[in-house]
Amino acid sequence: MEACVAPYPMPDTSPRNTPDLPSMPPRPGESRQDWVYRQMAGAIATGLLGPGQPVPSTRTLATRWAVSRGVVELAFERLAQEGYLQATVGRGTRVSDPLPEHFLRAAPATTPACASVATAEPAVPAVRAGQPFVARLPDTMALDLKAWRTSVARAAQALEPGLLHASDPRGLPALREAICRHLALARGVVCTPGDILIVTGIRHAIDLCAQFLAREARPARVAIEDPGYRGAAELFALRGCATVAVAVDGEGMKVQDLKHSGAGAAYLTPAHQAPTGVALSPRRRTELLQWAQEHDATLIEDDYDSDFSYETAPLPALKSQDTTGRVLLCGSFNKSLFPALRIGYIVAPPRHLSALICLRAATGRANAVLDQLALADFMASGAFTRHLQRTRLRHQRRRDLVLAELRTAGLPAELGQGLHAGFHFVLRLPPGVSEAAVIASAAQRGLALQGLASFWQGSSPSPPPALVLGYTALTDAQARWSARQLATVIRQLQQAGPAALAPP
């Protein structure tokens, strides 16, 4: 019998398999460093050295090309600063994956299968890791994979026949207990495992809340932030809820406008408003809770990125102040750990929770038991807390790199908004520079940008010209390079004057 072999063996990308690069003679007057840089850049541009492939060592190249090793090292540093090379301890130097030309080019807009429920508006770039500036995702390179694998292994060892039924739609008690401990310390929310429902993420949580509201009132009327998260508005509409846009200012949702909206529920992102980045002020928190109590209304708190607060500790969750059972708190580990995890949660008062559990059971049982056990172990071991501490520093560094490049280019620091937390901040544009002009010009340089206007729901007044810059799921080199490109675009539009400010 013939042995079974894999039909497509994995390529050998170890450092020993690096090619022996050819070289062209130096050009007249070209320095040795520029010559080495040109040879390496050419090898990458032509595909001789592909993304993720190891490159020859500086010692090898210095010998083969008859130059000093210091010359090669300076050329490598230049290529690394421009995002073409990445040096990793234990793996040597490799070609960046993705390359600047790849990660700076916006993906073509596609029409979703559910286009019939969407409005006929211009397509916006999809959120994607490595794509400036729509990289509003966690930095998965920060995850301690060894610790996660250990938790997965322990979870597999803990499996018992009884757990394989996974009959409780609320999720495993061990995970709900771990979430209770985390919320008490990180968000000031005191709850019990019986208050928690495990879901697959924020969108699943919002969808269940929308179904609950649609069953409670006919027709249900939900207030949403403006500008705000369009995905939430679409989910409410899909479940038959009418939405009304309520403006957001420097303190968050304007409660005075909410009082005249006729809404029986409100969806909001208090910790780091999506997309403006403002935090709901203490005064507005009190007013919102009073409004909910007076109108027997429900508040849906989307706590999507509160685990990443940079300079100071965040305000406690709005749910922590809820004494009358009005707030549904929605959170997700897909943002805190990695998107493919697909685990989130809802913390709800008893009246809401029983209905949500029935809806969860009707549409599908709890998440995979092994995933739940692994996450519970990861949290109980302290690895989750260490992960958050490490990732906050990485995210903050990326933010600071982008800001440093923009400030070096002459853009005032006060143009940034929502810098205190999350995966993005808002860059207000200088007077006279339009969103459309910047977006169109930046696209020619491969930048995918979203203007604040694309999040506008239609309340008055419309937001001032600004860009929503996602930076967390970029490399340091990507953050620097793309910020320089953006700063160049804005400078050129300012210098060109009014004639150049209209979009092409």
Image (spheres, rainbow, N blue to C red):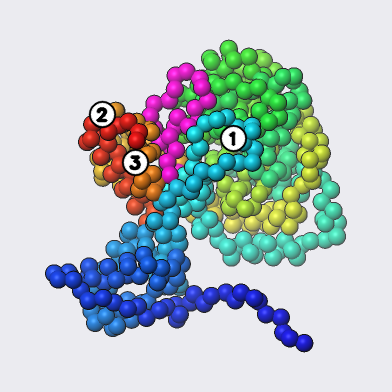
Q: In this view, does 45 lie above or below 302?
A: below
Earlier-in-chain disc, 1 versus 3: 1
Circles 1 and 3 in contact, beta carbons < 8 Å: no
Earlier-in-chain disc, 1 versus 2: 1
Q: In this view, does 333 lie above or below 450?
A: below
Name the outermost residue toward the top.
260
Q: Name the residue under label 2.
A: 498
Residue 466: x %, y % from top left: 39, 32
In the rendered structure, which segment of residues is drawn in magenta?
448-471
Q: In this view, does 118 lie to the left or right of 89?
A: right
Select label 1 or label 2 by which is in front.
2
What is the number of the mark on residue 135? Answer: none
Three-letter amino acid code at the position of disc 1: Gly
Residue 330 visible here: no
Residue 391: x %, y % from top left: 49, 52
Three-letter amino acid code at the position of disc 3: Ser
Element at label 3: helix
For image coordinates 72% across by 61% down, the residue present is 155
Q: Mark 1 points at which residue?
A: 231
Earlier-in-chain disc, 2 versus 3: 3
Three-letter amino acid code at the position of disc 2: Pro
Q: How far apart are marks 1 and 2 (CA)?
A: 35 Å
Mark 3: few/some/many CA within 10 Å (<14, 14-19, 20+)? some
What is the number of the mark on residue 441? Answer: 3
Name the outermost residue toward the bottom.
1
Quadrant in which the C terminus appears:
top left
Mark 1: few/some/many CA within 10 Å (<14, 14-19, 20+)? few
Residue 453: x %, y % from top left: 45, 29
Q: In this view, does 59 lie to the left or right of 192?
A: left
Element at label 1: helix
